[in-house]
Structures are given as structure tokens and as C-alpha cells.
Image: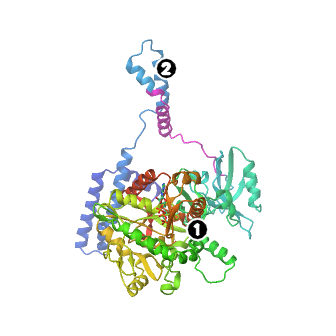
Amino acid sequence: MKPAMENRAKVDLLNVKDEDLVQILSHVLKEVKDTTGRDINGTELLHSLLNTPWLQSLLKVYECLQQYLRTWATPYLSYASGLSLEILSDLRALPYPSYEARELYCLLMEPHMQALLSAHDVVGLKDYEPVLPPLPEDLVNNEEAMRIVCMVKNNQPLGATIRRDEMTGEIYVARVIHGGLADRSGLLHAGDRLVEVNGHPVFGLEPEQIIKILAHSHGTVMFKVVPITDRPVNNKTTLFVRAMVDYNPHQDPGIPCVDAGMAFRKGNLLEIVDQTDALWWQAKKLPCSLTCAGLVPSACMFKRKLKDFWWSQPHTCNKVLSTVDEEDDMMAIDVSILETDEEAFESEELKEDESEFSASVDGIYLAGFRRSLRVCRRHRVQGGGLGPNRSPCCSSSSSLVSPYEEVVRYQRHPEDRHRLIALLGPSGVGVNELRRKLIEINPRTFQGATPHTTRPRKWYEEPGREYHYITRDQFESMVYNNRFVEYGEFRGHLYGTSVDAIKDVLAAGKICTIDIDPYAIASVRTHELKAYIIYIKPPPLAQMKRTRLKAQVTNYCTSRPFRNEDFHEIEEAACRMEQHYGQFFDHVIVNDGLQAACVRLMTAVRRAQDEPQWVPASWIRPTEQI
Ligand SMILES: Nc1ncnc2c1ncn2[C@@H]1O[C@H](COP(=O)(O)OP(=O)(O)OP(=O)(O)O)[C@@H](O)[C@H]1O
């Protein structure tokens, strides 16, 4: 087709109306059908082509475009803001403006209205500034596309890090910090090659020298960059994690940029917003007030660091790398005290048993307050007693060594079983006092779990009330099958709290409330029990002394008033417990005044059951470990 004819055809096509098009198409179809009937070569092909859905769709698109061209929005006025200025000046000139005139004046004076009218004019006049200068005529075809990026520096950092390619000496943008100035501009990307900063060529410079140039520039900073051609896609969705370790970028010589780093503590909730770099992630701390993310080591990088740290320490045996390996120290007991007090314990236990025999509220026995179980914790089986490596904390020790634990928001359905409430705290802080109060106030809602024991039943005890009485073989079999959340041995008898005893309480629709030792944390943080862990924290020393003036400390088997050293012991044990296990605490209650602490405990328990909480993702859906 000759150019002139071609143009005419284009014009004709543009002038074509909907109906015309449909008509043309049906003509073509009819024509083709007739010719097919006459068996002309190639007509069948054309027929099927014209009937193809894509061609039909294309024609529909074409019709829509035509329709759009016909109804093209044109500005009613080309200079609306000018007209508004004229109206404003007329209104001002009115000697006695009416109410409507005053209202119109106020409306037109609104900055939003003026901005809207001005935007209308810009669009109407197609007055899109700035007009770029024409490209130089002698432009070499293969010259790299450069981008000039101007940013106005305020007090914020630019939010990007740079690196030097040691082979070529080129400087690249290493990463752009999520939510930072560079990220929000959308103009700088990881992998862009930096050519100039404020007119200074940067080739061959050390990153520190470039940072100096940036530090000395005020106001607008201009970068000349060669944009990266294939930008890596951050296709991983946002991840929420609970930090299982502390991190301080200022103590990490390996961090690419200390100022971009983000410190966090064990137990902090983090939103991982960028995982593009396998070694350094970008994260925000929750609840988040900052828009800008910070650099944190990736899970893989952390594991590497922990491993390096572990190997740099002197070792005598092959222990599992764990953040809780000082537990033994913490729980060490003076066995000699136990041995000398055996007799006293026996009679004390009897006394306690007798007093607890009548410890029932509304005819409901308060199970799980036997002192024998609590005492034997301090004397519990260490590892091999019941078989190789069967200590309960080993069953899921991997959860304790992962630097981040993926978490999700979980809201218990009102018809689902309640979450287990597990209280823990340093011995003597008042864990059992609070737990007892909670159950006493509402024994129909709260209940402890009945422990198991291998010791013989006493005449006044009822099976399943004080204890579940089982043989040693049965007990050991339960241990091997991981059916205990914690267990221990005292004076030749085994005592333990079983998963099934907890499940029985939960199945009865009650809120099972138990107290645990830290080593049992891993056994209750399971999909099955969904434990909500409440840490009972001692108040400051002076307050602890003041509130415990009349209290009795139960020291293995005897009761006596608190002494100064008891308070110091509680404080030190609390410090160690928080340091080693703080990441697992869902809630912390300071046990200052008993009444107030009890009210806070009830509120926390209600929230745990009825409000959304962050829980390990593995409870809700199976995940790969990060
Ligand atoms: N807030 C408080 N104010 C005054 N006395 C308290 C308070 N909390 C607990 N007590 C008292 O402190 C003593 C120790 O409390 P409790 O037996 O509950 O400790 P515990 O944390 O369960 O430790 P253990 O398991 O070693 O017994 C008890 O006599 C208790 O009445």
C-alpha cells in the first residue's frame, strides 16, 4: 500500500463506528462462508482465523478505544484557576456580600481547592514541566543510559549503602533500606552503578571517601547512576519473627553498615520486610513507629555467627549448641540440704498432704499443688536417669537454638479448647500463691493438672485426685513417649505432669493453669497445648521486702520468714531466668501487691484466651525452619 493510501485507510478506520465494525465483520464472515462453500484454497484458514476468540477480543478492544477517543475528556475551561482569581476579586469588591457569596469566597480560598484547580489547568493545557532539552544529535547509539537522581537531604540518612567492586573499582548501590529516603524516592536501586556524587566522579574511590562527600553535602544531593538492568525481585512475602537472641550492630564487626543496623533483644517481635540478601535482612521492630527498616543478620548469617562463636569457646564435650546451656547452673541444688532434711520433709509432706486434703473450693479439689512435685524439680532426673538423652528439654531443643522463630497472629475460636496457662518464676516469688488464688476465685473455670507419681498411695488419697498412681515401668514408658511436660525423681519416687492430664482439664472446657520450670518451656510450647507463658517477676528489692514482711518461705521442707538472702536469691534467679528464657515469655506480671498481681493475672489469662496473640507459626501451619 502506498503511504497516501495507507494514511487514508487509517483515517477511515478511525472514523469507523461500532455498528459499522460489526457490520464489516459480519460481511467478511458471510463472504468467507460463501467462498468456503465454493472450496476456494485458503478460505477455510481465513474463516477459522476470523472466528478466533483472540481476534474477536482484539476487535472489541479496538472498539473500546474508539469509544474512548470519541469521549475524550477535554477541559471545560482552559484556565480555571485564573477564573477563580477573577471571581475572588469580584467577591472581595462586593460591598454587602450575601451568605452564599461569603461561602463561595471561603471555598475558593481553600488551599486544596486552589491546588485542585491548578492541577486541572496543568492537565487541561498539557503543561507538563520541565520540558527536557532535545537529545544531542551526535549521541552515540551504544552509550549507557544514565539517570540523574536528585534528593533533598534532611536530617534523615539517605537510606542506602554502597560497595566497591574490588576487581573493577566501580561503586555500586549495595542495598536500599526499606522505607528510607532513597527507597521512597523510587529512583535508586540495589545494583545501580554510581558514577558521580554532586559532580565528583566516584570511580576508584573507597566507600568511606564517598560517605565523606555525602556528609559534607547539604540540601540537594545529586547522583549520576547507571541503572541496573535486571533488578532482583524480593518475591518473599513479609515475615514476622520473634527474636530468640540479642543483637547489637555496634558489636558486630561483620555488618556492612553499622548506622543502618538495628539492635534488638530476645523476645522482640520483628517484621522482616526484605530478604533479598541471603545474609542481611531488613526488619522493623513491632509495634512499629518508624517508617525506615534496619539491617539485621539473616537466620543463616546468625547461625553462622553462633557456630563461629561456639567453636571459639573451649569445650569438653559435645553439647547441643543452645542458648540455655547455663540452665544446669541455675537449677543446681544443694543435695546435702535435701538429704539432711529428708525426715523433716517426710513429716512436712504429710502435714501438707493433710492440709491439702481439705483444700477444696465449692467441692472441687485443687489439684497440682503437691509440694513433693515442686521439691523434686530441684532433684529431677538429669539426662540419663530414664534413658539416653530423654531429658524433656532435648525433645525440641532445635526450637531453642534458632535465632528467629516465625510467628503468626492467632485468635482462639470461642469453641476451641483453651490455651494452657503456664506460670513460671524464680522459686519463692509467689508463682503458686498466685496460681492458687486464681483457681480459688473461680474453680469452675480454672484447674491445675493432676500429677503422676510412682510413690504408693496413702490411705486418705484418692486415685486421680492428689495424683495418678502408676508403676515405674508405666512412668518410664510415658517418659520415653514424651508424655510428660516435666518430671523428676525424689527419694526413689518419680513425679511428673503429663500432657494427658493437661488435656483432660482442657477437654472439660476449663482453663488448665500449671506452674513449670524453665526447662519445661519447650514441652508446653506445642501445637497441642498452645501454652501462654506468664512470667512472675519479683518487684524491686525494697518493695519485695516490704510486701513479704509476714510471708513464709518454703525452703524444701520447712517454713520460716523470708530472710535478706532469700530476697537476693530471688532477684538473682530472676535475672538469670529473664536473661536465658525471656524470649519465651508471652506476658510478664510483677508480683508486688498480691491482690493487684492477681487482678493482672486474671486480665492476662482472659486476653490470652480471647484476644489475638503472636504464636509460633508451626502451631498453625507446618513451616520450614528459618
Ligand atoms: N505478693 C505477695 N505479697 C506477699 N507475700 C507473697 C506474695 N506473693 C507470694 N507471697 C508469699 O511468698 C511465699 C512464697 O510464695 P510461693 O510458695 O507461691 O512461691 P513459689 O514462687 O511458688 O515458689 P516455690 O515453688 O519454691 O514454692 C508464700 O508464703 C506466699 O504467701
Residue at mark 2 to residue at mark 1: CA–CA distance: 63 Å
Q: Judge left or right: residue 485 versus residue 303.
A: left
Q: Quadrant of residue 444?
A: bottom left
Callout 2 touching callout 1 (CB < 8 Å):
no
Question: Which of pointers 2 and 1 lies earlier in the amino acid sequence?
Answer: 2
Q: Residue 44: give its label.
A: none
User: What residue appears at the point 46 percent right and 69 percent down from the top-left corner?
Assistant: 516
Q: Judge left or right: residue 433 versus residue 511.
A: right
Closest to the observer: 527 or 573?
A: 573
- The residue range painted magenta reads 107-135
Residue 290 on image: x %, y %: 56, 51
Q: Quadrant of residue 310?
A: bottom right
Q: Quadrant of residue 309?
A: bottom right
Residue 624 seen in render:
no
Residue 561 on image: x %, y %: 53, 59
Tell us which disc is closer to us: 2 or 1: 1
Q: Is mark 2 within 8 Å of ligand 1?
A: no
Closest to the observer: 283 or 51?
A: 283
127 within the magenta span: yes
Residue 130 seen in render:
yes
At label 2, the amino acid type is Ser
Identify the residue position indicated by label 2 in the image.
89
At label 1, the amino acid type is Ser
Dot 1: element: loop
Asked if residue 344 is positioned above or below residue 152 in the image, the reply reads below
Identify the residue position indicated by label 1 in the image.
298
Closest to the observer: 449 or 549?
A: 549
337 within the magenta span: no
Q: Quadrant of the N terminus?
A: bottom left
